[in-house]
Image (tube, rainbow, N blue to C red):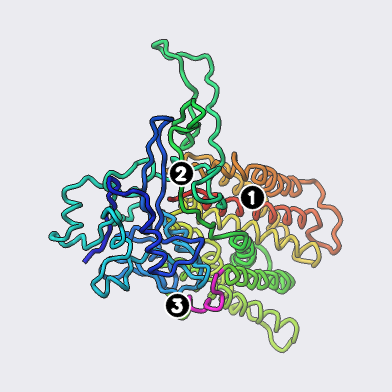
Amino acid sequence: MNYGFVIDNSRCIGCHACSTACKSENEVPLGVNRTWVKYVEHGAFPDVTRSFQVTRCNHCENPPCVRICPVTAMYQRDDGIVEFDKDVCIGCKACMQACPYDAIHIDPNTHTAAKCHYCAHRVDLGLEPACAVVCPTEAIVAGDLDDPMSKIAKLVGRSRTSVRKPEQGTSPKVLYIEGDALALHPTVLAERPRQLAFTQVVTRQGSTPAPAAPKSPAKTAASGARLRAPQAQGLPSTTIRSGGRMAEQMVQLGYNAQHEIPWHWQVPAYLVTKGIAAGIFAFLAIGWNLGLFAFDLGAMIWAGLLAVLATLATTGLLVADLERPERFLSILLRPQWRSWLTRGAFLLVGFAGVSGAWWAVEAAAAWTGAFEVSALARAALGWATAPLAIGAAVYTAFLFAQAEGRDLWQSPLLPIHLLIQATMMGTGALLCVAAFVELDPGLVAAARVTLGVSLAVDLFAILVGELGIPHATELAARAAHEIHRGRYAAGFWWGAIVLGHLVPLALLLAPAWGPAPVAGGGWLGALAAACATVGLYIYEYAFVMAPQELPNS
């Protein structure tokens, strides 16, 4: 069996019977939708038409929401239905990031993920989904696509059908007859709507207005034709428009479901605290074990304590961001190993356990004097900590790569970029400690040089790698534009670039570090690290938020 839907747009009258039947059958709360009808209007008065598109979960053949769910709350049944379990869901919202169609929401009553589930409780009784039963024009056909004798299979066989975003590789099983290409493609109407039928505009989703077309210089081709200046990749200056007052746009959005943004400040904050914790231990472990600088007990005690506190803060931020934080242990007790949220949780637990044990042993030896840590034991703990620290630093890149609804996050540079940022945060934290505690001069010098190099490399990675190189998809290009030319531009340039990179580099290159409270790093090094930390948070906030604000439906 392989259940799917066919939506016949030639029959749909936009009555919303399917939406209301879905709400009634599944007790869907107000403010969220499992099924909705998107209105797109075409033309200029008096030649105006309106198309309707029944929109919902596609019950993909290859569902990304199932892969990313850490506790198998989102799963695919053997009959092809993509189902969810509200009694298992922890509310991590990763499935919402993985869905390229904005089909999943958080139920405001249960605080768990929910979506169209093909009325699985009815299907198990031999009944059709409620939306198919109630449709007055039989525009919704449900059934087994693998059964050649079924009504849906025959309809697909004799009709030209289309799907939403086929380039995602999810193989959607909601097929549209006479699908409106402009309605199927969400970024045709990517700007935040100023008004909608039936409702106020409350969503934050929607890009800033498209940039004006660049003025064409007085250039001509060899043929004598006047030339237009090239536009930015993925950012056409206008949609199709007409000049009349009665219908300003040739294509406009009449109605669509409005979606919440899943992840907020906790995620960029966690990226910073995780970078601090992993960066400190990775730098110390590798530097000491390779003999790059001498072992320093003060660095181990005080910088290690800072790393332990940053690890605890990372855990607290991750748990606080869950809609059902009381269920957070489910990731460890019933893991779904395809999910990088699960793999990352175990990497964090392993890193916290080993690095915490190393710090506790060194601190107990120093404060009690009852024993000494041998060089062999210290080396073993260091080599055990280093790969776990690196794994903790970079695993988020693989988690973001599973978020198939956010194209900007699908960057092959991201693992290296996160490692560079962890190096920045770790060495910066050591310079902060060195401003108040006397540390080995060789360690401080190495931290200062490493911070400067990592800042320069990170600046190059951001400007050239993440944002400068043309992106593979329109959504990625639009998100990058929002960061450096749109609503996040001021914070990006003045916060992330100037405050977060140029100011720290200037401070590190200053001829004198200035007076230090204790012999060691000096306050300029600590100030450089503080600026880099604030700048990194500003950058991560824009990087996390901008892709979420682009519509997928």
Q: Residue at x 52, y 78 (%)?
A: 327
Locate residue 386 relative to residue 471 in the image: left or right. right
Residue assigned mark 1: 453
Q: Are marks 1 and 2 in contact (CB under 8 Å)?
A: no
Mark pair 1, 2: CA separation: 52 Å
Write the residue at 68% across / 57% down: 446
Q: In this figure, which residue is indicated by the disc labeled 3?
A: 87
Few, some or many C-alpha atoms within 10 Å of disc 1 (few <14, some 14-19, many ≥20)? some
Q: Earlier in the sequence, mark 1 or mark 3?
A: 3
The mark found on residue 109 in the picture is: none
Image quarter for residue 40?
A: top left
Position above or below: 226 against 544: above
Question: Marks 3 and 2: in contact by CB < 8 Å?
Answer: no
Q: Earlier in the sequence, mark 1 or mark 2?
A: 2
Q: Which residues are magenta?
A: 322-331
**Residue 241 horizontal/vertical position (percent):** 46, 30
Q: Identify the residue under disc 2.
A: 254
Question: Which amino acid is tagged 2?
Answer: Gly
Queried whether the magenta region covers residue 364, the answer comes back as no
Which is more foreground, mark 2 or mark 3? 2
The quadrant in which the N terminus is found is: bottom left
Who comes first in sequence, dot 2 or dot 3? Answer: 3
Q: Is residue 28 above or below residue 502?
A: below
